[in-house]
Image (cartoon, rainbow, N blue to C red):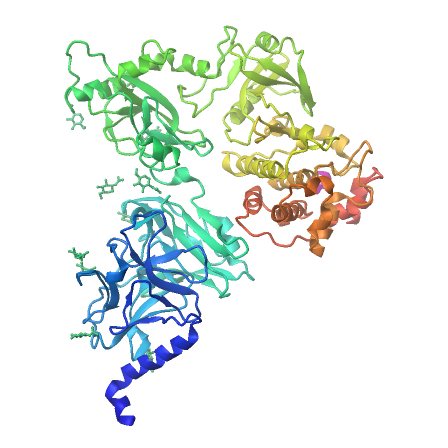
Amino acid sequence: METTISALGPGALYMLVMLLLSLQGSPTGATDVITATQPLSGQQKLVSQGGKFAMGFYQPSGGPQDKWYIAIWYNKVQKVTPVWIANRETPISNPDSSVLTIWTDGNLVLLNKSRSIVWSSNTSVTAGASNTTTVAVLLNTGNLVLAYASNTSNMIWQSFDHPTDTQLPGMKFGRNKLTGVSNRQVSWRDHTDPSPGIFSLVMDPNITAQYLFIWNNSRSYFTPGKFNPQTGAFAGIPSMTVMSRPNSVYSYEYVDNDKEEYFLLTVNDDNIFLRTVIDPSGQQKGMVWMEEKQDWMLYFVEPSDLCSVYSACGAFSWCAVDSVPMCSCLWGFSPQSPTEWSSGNYTGGCTRNVALPCRLSGGGSTPSMSSGYEEDRFYVTNNVRLPDGSQVVQATTISDCEVACLHNCSCLAYSYNGTCSLWYNDLVNLQQDLDNRGDNIFIRLPASEIRHTKSIRGRTIGLAIGVSALTLGVSLIGVLCLLRRRRIKGLHNIDMNLMAFGYRDMKLITKNFTDKLGGGSFGSVFKGVLQDGTVVAIKRLEGVHQGEKQFRAEMSTIGNIHHLNLIRLVGFCSEGEHRLLAYEYMAHGSLDGCLFKTSSDDLLPWKTRYQIAIGVAKGLTYLHDKCRDCIIHCDIKPQNILLDTSFVPKVSDFGLAKLLGRDFSRVMTTMRGTIGYLAPEWISGTAITTKADVFSYGMMLFEIISHKRNIDEHGGDRRVDKFFPILVAEKIQEGNVQALLDSDLRRDVDFEELKRACMVACWCVQEDESSRPTMGAVVQMLEGLIEVTMPPVPRYLKVLAESAYQPSTVSDKLAAV
Ligand SMILES: *[C@@H]1O[C@H](CO)[C@@H](O)[C@H](O)[C@H]1NC(C)=O
Ligand SMILES: *[C@@H]1O[C@H](CO)[C@@H](O)[C@H](O)[C@H]1NC(C)=O
Ligand SMILES: *[C@@H]1O[C@H](CO)[C@@H](O)[C@H](O)[C@H]1NC(C)=O
Ligand SMILES: *[C@@H]1O[C@H](CO)[C@@H](O)[C@H](O)[C@H]1NC(C)=O
Ligand SMILES: *[C@@H]1O[C@H](CO)[C@@H](O)[C@H](O)[C@H]1NC(C)=O
Ligand SMILES: *[C@@H]1O[C@H](CO)[C@@H](O)[C@H](O)[C@H]1NC(C)=O
Ligand SMILES: *[C@@H]1O[C@H](CO)[C@@H](O)[C@H](O)[C@H]1NC(C)=O
Ligand SMILES: *[C@@H]1O[C@H](CO)[C@@H](O)[C@H](O)[C@H]1NC(C)=O
Ligand SMILES: *[C@@H]1O[C@H](CO)[C@@H](O)[C@H](O)[C@H]1NC(C)=O
């Protein structure tokens, strides 16, 4: 016996022991090692000790039948989710005739039917490595290691150093400083094709503690910014702090030493499956497995806005975050592949409807003067971030610049800002400029294309202004003054012009203010119809003592704000004493009207209300964070939320607070003594921040949840027993959300969402501003992207609630808090 063992050698003995151990350790009886005598083929798979990961031949669902890959996936997750692919560039056609084994040089290799190496761990041969001395082991971290059989800690190669598109906990994502090699993650081509796609993640070679999103191995299009170890967050995306909360089960850290720098994701609970992936869309997604839902849940997405992904819309189209779909072909262009386009893959871009005659007749030469040739024209697209790859030429005026482009058939577009820039290549990455600081670009089109738009006669530039008026549907002869803008505005709806109306036009449009829609805190609202039939809502401001100049300045701020969930200002009138605003008309009126109905037949379904809550939060997020100047709404309540035909909510009246110099004494008097929507800081007199809106939003969210007013001033079915927000806060603490439901809620409510909404609302109405979440966080919480923790009972409201029906002195009560 003794002799046999020594003849086998220590390596073989180790292998034997390990084999026995692994057979014991894994519940399925599957092994976790590959050796030269024990290769992997066909249906066989490795299962890591602990049973978390498996490895074997894999085929993406929906992919071609003859392409198989060696992959590692989660053994316990029903939905097969590969985290690593060996031969992503060299699939094999038949797993039964292929083997994954140890090669004579000790490398792990994949052999096809004709015994050729189609993939190899391909590490340079190390002393003593051969098919008898090395083994491949699948570890329970999802790492496949090639090591000496005598000591598997003595690693030769590991899959964690060669990631595909996924970062797993325990895997270093970084750069070897000695070799300069970065272990980049490269996206799949698409969801059925693991071959290397166009997007990758790589450490920034120039800035420490930062990684980059790269397009086509060349261009960096996004970075989350520098990692701050103190906060555990990246500078550009503070919301990722969630990942590193002190008692969080997962953490992110950055390590920097002489040899290497890397990011490391750690999860200290083995039952939590977490991964980040660079997706074929160019976004990085953090996902966690939800056993209850049997699906992956997103916990972060970066960049959150797809327009930030380079060339997301392909060539000759432009990207606008808020439009649906987000990509639109430029004028005169249509999707290259309408099927792909309609399925939401815009990367193919757009092509011309009609080829440029100039180009046809002679490539890059000067336009031919053959008979029947009509000079190309230009079509302006406004407020875009210009594509790169332009060439600057000498030109002193915009028409010189146009001529310069016109005279070279290869020139496809020009832009003039004092400098004349010409483009000769496909225009990619055009984007709507959210800050409205974009430029105008003039795109070359055949004359025939421009002639088809009946509103244009002659050259485009001169007409751009007039046509923009037409697109608004406003062609009133009585338009008195067109708000002068610095730039020429054109046909594309990227930017909106504000129309200035005369008071007489306003009277015409509203039929002398006969059809009153309602009244807000700042005036009355009337229905109006423009000459072309467009229905608008005209708000007549009362008691505005603002200077003309300031009024206009404010109008241009508000007019430049575009978001799906913010009401769009169409125009205004400022004449003499009169101040009127024209908004897009909302068919379903205010949330107030839809929410508080006496009959229970036509209550808004839960799903609709939940979407309304998210929509309002998105609109406010935009006001707070995304506009050039942060705008605090100051008066969030159901009356100021309007609903369009599909119940998409639009926040209205924003900016008016600013317009009126935040003179809230009137609002204050009506609010005093009742628990309305006002944050305590309004009453206590401290500075107002965006968190005041968060408070009001929270109060409104309670009403959206309950379908009832928190306070019913007219008696009716007032909740006598308990103030609803306090009831919610207490029931949540007891873990008894069900208790909140009354009969008309129960029908269609989603418990998970209800619980989330209740908790979010409680957080929003915390007395301490800093405890309240930002609106951005509210959106993420409601969408289930980040977890909501247990909110404390809002003390302030509790005290107030006790005095709710003695509307006397709120401030006294506050002083007592
Ligand atoms: C190991 O490699 C040797 C050549 O170095 C070869 O003769 C032998 O067949 C290989 N063993 C296995 C199991 O593949
Ligand atoms: C095996 O791979 C080699 C090299 O990649 C290739 O030339 C050969 O056609 C493949 N054989 C089969 C049966 O796929
Ligand atoms: C192995 O690496 C070398 C260079 O490092 C490369 O030329 C070769 O193509 C690689 N072989 C395989 C099978 O990946
Ligand atoms: C195994 O290899 C590791 C790393 O090379 C080394 O630190 C350790 O001492 C080795 N163990 C034995 C038993 O040789
Ligand atoms: C890093 O810096 C070098 C030199 O300034 C520059 O050429 C290179 O483009 C930079 N790389 C990235 C990814 O920013
Ligand atoms: C990516 O870059 C390569 C050259 O490095 C180029 O040939 C290819 O066309 C580029 N891909 C796209 C989609 O532009
Ligand atoms: C989108 O379509 C292009 C071809 O136009 C294709 O190469 C790419 O893989 C597709 N992307 C996705 C995510 O399906
Ligand atoms: C047109 O522009 C291209 C790119 O700048 C240049 O190579 C070409 O010579 C120009 N053609 C004429 C006729 O000027
Ligand atoms: C004009 O455009 C050029 C090229 O896009 C740019 O470099 C320059 O800064 C711009 N100038 C002004 C005044 O905006």
Give residue 658's quadrant in the image. top right
Judge whether 282 appears above or below 542 on screen.
below
Residue located farthest toward the bottom when viewing the structure as drawn: 2
Is residue 428 found inside the magenta-colored segment of the image? no
User: Which sits in the foreground, 725 or 144?
Assistant: 144
160 displayed left or right of 810: left
Q: Is residue 175 above or below residue 140?
A: above
Q: Position of residue 454 (x, y in %)?
A: 37, 11
Rendered residue at 81%/31% (across/down): 714
Range of magenta residues: 679-684
The percent position of residue 260, horizontal first and vertical second, equals 33, 63
Between 446 and 353, the residue placed more toward the observer is: 353
Main SS of residues in magenta: helix
Q: Quadrant of residue 399?
A: top left
Question: Vertical placement of 796 versus 716: above or below?
Answer: below
Position of 172 relative to 362 (above/below): below
